[in-house]
């Protein structure tokens, strides 16, 4: 006889709400975790992602080019062989697909993307990880790097480390926790980090600011920080001197509001 595994809450005991959401037991609720890392923040504002500079905010969905900086990331190579990509189309609806890599030669996505929300390695060769940066963007591709970069997987990570997420149409995002940590070799450099939100109007609005020196800050948002449909949140940082590392984490509950 098959055993039915159910939430202990339904049996009159307590189970945390977040765990129920993660287990898929609450209809219309999804747990979203967004992690970002930038190993070299300098004195100009940068997004918390591996590339440096700021993540572009496009206004038109585009077919994206997927390529690697390494020739080993290919369909029969020792590095990454396929990647999964998911994001929002021009109507802010979720689209996704699997892309088979071809080294430094770009492979076009089937879908058009306004924003990328997920990017991770699906299959690998004997190296067990992507051998180079896996890049996703538009424009001319040179040595596996597109002219305009939308997202990437840093070498060896098998997963995007990009502190940026966009809420699909018909949903509202509720950020319940945000974490930022920073460090530098000297221990004397201050770093200012920003949580920024923008919608279809393209205006960036600051939601939180933290100034750190080799430390971390945890934001427990109660009530939750609301991210309306078709809005994006992202983390940026700037150092008072060069060569700082910054990591961030967003804990978001996505709740379906539309049909």
Image (cartoon, rainbow, N blue to C red):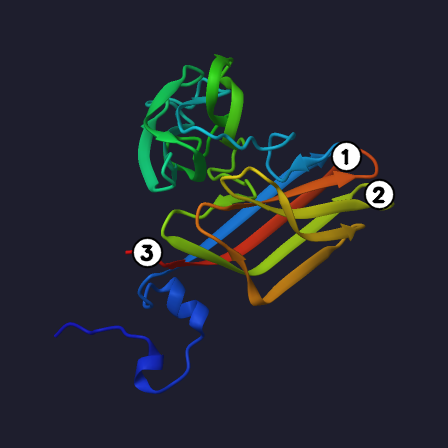
Residues 37 and 43: in front is 43
Question: Is residue 144 among what the camera can see?
Answer: yes
Whichever of callouts 1 and 3 sits on the residue coming sooner in the sequence is 1
Q: Which residue is mark 3?
A: 258
* Residue 243 - label: 1
Q: Farthest right residue?
A: 188
- Quarter of the figure with residue 254: bottom left
Between the C-alphas of marks 2 and 1, the distance is 9 Å
**Residue 68 on image: x %, y %:** 47, 22
Left or right of 57 in this view: 181: right
Whichever of callouts 2 and 1 sits on the residue coming sooner in the sequence is 2
Residue 179 lies, with reference to residue 21, above or below; the image says above
The reply to whether the C-beta atoms of the residues labelled 1 and 3 are less than 8 Å apart is no
Between the C-alphas of marks 2 and 3, the distance is 46 Å
Q: Which residue is mark 2?
A: 189
Q: What SS does tag 3 mark? A: loop
Residue 180 lies, with reference to residue 219, above or below; the image says above
Q: Farthest left residue?
A: 1
Residues 194 and 65: in front is 194
Residues 69 and 254: in front is 254
**Residue 154 on image: x %, y %:** 54, 32
Residue found at x 20% / y 74%: 3
In this rendering, the label closer to the viewer, 1 or 3: 3
**Residue 66 on image: x %, y %:** 41, 24
* Residue 78 - label: none
Q: What SS does tag 1 mark? A: loop
In this rendering, the label closer to the viewer, 2 or 3: 3
Left or right of 111 in this view: 178: right
The reply to whether the C-beta atoms of the residues labelled 2 and 1 are less than 8 Å apart is yes
Whichever of callouts 2 and 3 sits on the residue coming sooner in the sequence is 2
- Quarter of the figure with residue 241: top right
Structural crowding at the residue carrying mark 1, measured as other residues with C-alpha within 10 Å and reported as few (<14), some (14–19) or many (≥20): some
């Amino acid at each position: 006889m098959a055993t039915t595994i159910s939430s202990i809450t339904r049996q009159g005991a307590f189970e945390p709400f977040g765990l129920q959401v993660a287990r898929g037991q609450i209809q219309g609720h999804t747990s979203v975790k967004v992690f970002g890392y930038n190993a070299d923040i300098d004195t100009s504002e940068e997004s918390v992602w591996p590339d440096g500079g700021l993540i572009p905010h496009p206004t038109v969905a585009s077919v994206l080019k997927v390529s690697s900086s390494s020739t080993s990331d290919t369909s029969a190579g020792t590095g990454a062989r396929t990647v999964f990509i998911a994001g929002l189309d021009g109507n802010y609806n979720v689209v996704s697909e699997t892309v088979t890599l071809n080294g430094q030669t770009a492979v076009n996505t089937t879908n058009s993307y306004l924003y990328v929300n997920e990017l991770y390695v699906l299959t690998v060769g004997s190296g067990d990880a992507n051998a180079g940066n896996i890049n996703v963007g538009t424009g001319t591709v040179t040595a596996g790097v597109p002219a305009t970069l939308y997202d990437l997987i840093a070498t060896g990570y098998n997963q995007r480390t990009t502190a940026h997420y966009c809420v699909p149409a018909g949903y509202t995002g509720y950020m319940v926790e945000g974490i930022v940590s920073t460090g530098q070799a000297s221990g004397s450099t201050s770093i200012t980090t920003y949580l920024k939100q923008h919608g279809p109007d393209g205006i960036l609005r600051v939601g939180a600011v933290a100034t750190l020196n080799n430390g971390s800050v945890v934001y427990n948002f109660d009530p939750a920080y609301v991210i309306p449909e078709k809005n994006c949140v992202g983390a940026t940082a700037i150092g008072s001197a060069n060569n700082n590392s910054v990591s961030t984490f967003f804990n978001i509950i996505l709740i379906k509001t539309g049909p």
